[in-house]
């Protein structure tokens, strides 16, 4: 590398297609100089960690958890088995899986004081705000969670987080509707238990439709992890202070609360409703080309090909609508996708459907209001957040997150007494 300020040349190692930013500090104008830094708003081209959890090849549309293709996991696995894979790094044998499921199942209940905490929210409180607060509040119920260097204690809270997140999410849903909270039913599986806590009314035993149950399980698999996205980066950054895992995951929930992250599928539904009918699709597409409309649910920061999760969700949509009845918005979505995949305008810009394009349709078919969409995202993402947090706590290269800045403010100003200020 040649410094264009001084003409001096430096040699910097390239490892794994990266250079270490700290190696640039040797490039100075003089000995008193701090050294060269990199400037990368939104971390568009910066790797902050080494990770063996999730692999993405955006150009080829590949997503793998611990090396296993998402297509195979969605077809053959369950969410809890995938959660085990993310946490432990390998698929379990039958005995390991049975023990894992048992541990999570017996920890689905939350302390009664936490239920009272939920009841303190206004009737119109956003479910994500409630989930954010209750997740963080869990740390006060488990003081030993701060002992993150103890593997046994650490693991006990991994179990609790994955187990209790659906319960907290269901409490938030029922609270907004003025309905009594439903306790977990440990005879049901993970997605079935969540559906029961959402929808159980006066029946003695809630029996979820197996097609809905499986579709939700697939959605949970697809949303379990996605590399160093905004919420995962938040979990790692906050976790780098060595805070307890509940507080770190609460940071992930907060990041997911934002419309640019967890609210994207809501924007897709608004777009489909605005289009209204199949006949309006061509005019809408032309409006997109003219810069008058925004095409939501297409394109992705990472994927420059068809998001592999979108194909799987499209099939799950069809299974759900077998139970709930067809949503006319699905016909609009399918037609919009067909045109976009054939039109050179979109193909040349690599605007392919992403996971948000169809997921909102499933959530709506399940009877979910749009403010519950990011909550349904947070439940499965918890296993990914925790896997990333565990990896970070055991990575000797990691230190407390502390980015640099380029200062742009004033310097060496003299204080002026308030009476003398203009």
Image (cartoon, helix red, strand yellow):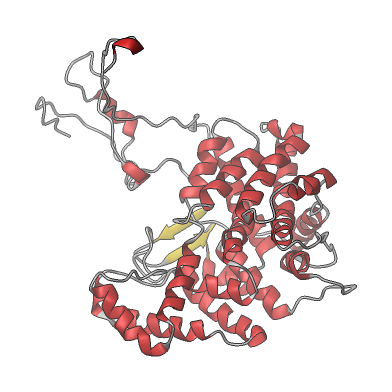
Q: Is residue 300 left or right of residue 288?
A: right
Where is residue 48 drawn, in percent x and y? 42, 40
Which of 138/70 is in front?
138
Q: Residue placed farthest to the bottom in the image?
A: 279
Q: Is residue 88 left or right of residue 45?
A: right
Can you say which quadrant of the picture contains the C terminus? top left
Where is residue 267 drawn, in percent x and y? 45, 66
Where is residue 65 drawn, in percent x and y? 54, 59
| Image: 296 above or below 254 | below
* Residue that appears at 73% across and 68% down: 195
Where is residue 367 drawn, in percent x and y? 65, 73
Residue 199, located in which quarter of the rendered image?
bottom right
Residue 409, located in which quarter of the rendered image?
top left
| Image: 152 above or below 57 | above
Say whether residue 89 is visible: no
Can you say which quadrant of the picture contains the N terminus? top left
Which of 131/58 is in front?
131
Q: Is residue 403 left or right of residue 109?
A: left
| Image: 50 above or below 187 | above
* Residue that appears at 57% across and 66% down: 370
- Labels in figure, total: 0
Say whether residue 220 is visible: yes
């Amino acid at each position: 590398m040649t410094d264009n300020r001084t003409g001096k040349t430096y040699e910097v190692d390239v490892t794994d297609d990266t250079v270490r930013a700290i190696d640039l500090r040797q490039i100075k104008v003089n000995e008193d100089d701090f050294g060269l830094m990199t400037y990368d708003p939104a971390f568009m081209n910066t790797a902050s960690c080494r990770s063996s959890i999730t692999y993405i090849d955006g150009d080829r549309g590949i997503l793998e958890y611990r090396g296993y293709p998402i297509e195979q996991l969605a077809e053959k696995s369950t969410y809890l088995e995938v959660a085990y894979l993310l946490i432990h790094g390998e698929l379990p044998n039958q005995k390991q899986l049975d023990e894992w499921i048992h541990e999570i199942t017996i920890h689905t209940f939350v302390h009664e004081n936490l239920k009272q905490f939920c009841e303190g929210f206004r009737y119109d409180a956003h479910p994500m705000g409630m989930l954010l607060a209750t997740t963080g509040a869990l740390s006060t119920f488990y003081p030993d969670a701060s002992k993150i260097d103890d593997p046994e204690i650490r693991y006990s809270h991994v179990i609790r987080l994955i187990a209790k997140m659906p319960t907290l999410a269901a409490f938030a849903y029922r609270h907004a509707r003025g309905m009594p909270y439903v306790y977990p039913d440990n005879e049901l599986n993970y997605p079935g238990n969540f559906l029961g806590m959402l929808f159980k009314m006066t029946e003695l035993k809630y029996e979820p439709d197996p097609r809905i149950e499986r579709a939700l399980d697939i959605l949970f698999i697809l949303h379990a992890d996605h590399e160093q996205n905004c919420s995962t980066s938040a979990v790692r950054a906050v976790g780098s202070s060595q805070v307890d895992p509940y507080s770190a995951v609460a940071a992930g929930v907060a990041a997911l609360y934002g419309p640019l992250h967890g609210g994207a599928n809501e924007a897709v539904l608004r777009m489909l409703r605005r289009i209204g009918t199949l006949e309006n699709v061509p005019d809408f597409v032309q409006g997109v080309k003219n810069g008058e409309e925004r095409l939501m649910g297409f394109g992705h920061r990472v994927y420059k090909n068809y998001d592999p999760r979108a194909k799987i969700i499209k099939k799950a949509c069809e299974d759900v609508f077998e139970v709930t009845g067809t949503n006319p918005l699905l016909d609009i979505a399918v037609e919009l996708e067909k045109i976009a995949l054939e039109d050179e305008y979109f193909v040349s810009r690599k605007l392919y459907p992403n996971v948000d394009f169809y997921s909102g349709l499933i959530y709506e078919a399940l009877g979910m209001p749009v403010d519950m969409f990011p909550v349904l995202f947070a439940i499965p993402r918890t296993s990914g957040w925790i896997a990333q947090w565990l990896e970070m706590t055991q990575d000797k290269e990691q230190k407390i997150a502390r980015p640099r800045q380029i200062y742009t403010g004033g310097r060496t100003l003299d204080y002026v007494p308030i009476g003398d200020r203009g």
